[in-house]
Amino acid sequence: MNAVLEGVRLAVIGGDDREIFLVPELQKCGAKIIGLGLEKSPLGDSIEHAKSFTEIIAKADALILPMFGTDARGLIKAKYSNSPIILNNEVLELIPPGVPLFIGWARPALISAAQKMNIDLVEIANRNEIVILNSIPSAEGAVQMAMEATTITIHSSESFVLGLGRCGMTLVNLLKGMGAKVTCVARKPSDLARAVEMGVRAIGFSDLEKEINRAEIVFNTVPALILGRDLLNKMSRETVIIDIASIPGGIDFEYAQMLGIKAQLAPGLPGIVAPKTAGKMLAKLYPPLILEHLVPAADAATAAAVRKGVPKNEI
């Protein structure tokens, strides 16, 4: 691997097993890695460990946060940390101009704060290349969960896939290859046409009410409430639902539980079922993206002046 990141100091903050495989690949590119919240990880002394945001931000050219991002309180997922790591406005104010902040999913509050502070916030979770590649372990993990939760085989099962986006297409292909009787539920006429081309049954969401009783396994990929009380009431109590949409998913989980329907929300499957594959996918994405967002010192100085309120025409 080319040393395209030679001399670049990267702060890797928190994360899960994906970071354990991501970090060595970035090091092969020449990057110096400083970790926060990785002190209990297998990476050990192969990286420098910081003890605070203040320390790590002062040493870094770019900051890398986990794919999961933060929760509503700003808590960063950090499997290998000895203590909670919180990203708040006080921390954001420490980030120098010209230092990009990479994150999987950014909550609206973080996006708003970054805009106000002129921080280069880079969300990567919705980038096509990431979503498509991540859809592979996501689909495999979803099928694995279904196999563990149901008493039937995937082969010959009545499997419904809600949504034919990038993850939905991968799921349909996998289920079809395993011999499932796949029904794809989509909104756009073009998606319904694609489902027909893929050789599976295609119905619109408007038809789901009269068809859902056939489903033995349901895979949801739509990040909006799809299976509410009315539809859940029409489903067999033996149906298994696996929701791989982003939190909070597309199912009324509380009502499903009341009915005795097994429904599981499963975000972040790539980091759970295939962290090595997922980490190496990120390692291919990051080097060119980091180089794209690193700015020369002169541009950083301009950004610093803007953050202080100096009009651009006076810089």
Image (cartoon, rainbow, N blue to C red):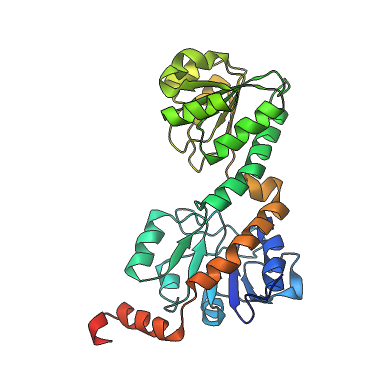
Q: Quadrant of residue 147?
A: top right
Q: How many marks?
A: 0
Above or below, comparing residue 145 to residue 293 in the picture = above
Q: Is residue 197 left or right of residue 224?
A: right
Above or below, comparing residue 185 to residue 112 in the picture = above
Residue found 57% across the figure and 59% down from its top: 66
Image quadrant containing the C terminus: bottom left
Residue found 51% across the figure and 78% down from its top: 54
* Residue 173: image location, x then y, percent: 64, 32
Residue found 70% across the figure and 45% down from its top: 273
Image quadrant containing the N terminus: bottom right
* Residue 285: image location, x then y, percent: 59, 61
Q: Quadrant of residue 298?
A: bottom left
* Residue 153: image location, x then y, percent: 73, 22
Residue found 52% across the figure and 53% down from its top: 125
Q: Can residue 25 be spotted in the picture?
A: yes
Q: Is residue 293 left or right of residue 28?
A: left
- Residue lying furthest front in this view? 197
* Residue 189: image location, x then y, percent: 42, 27
Q: Can residue 187 be spotted in the picture?
A: no
Q: Is residue 168 left or right of residue 72?
A: right
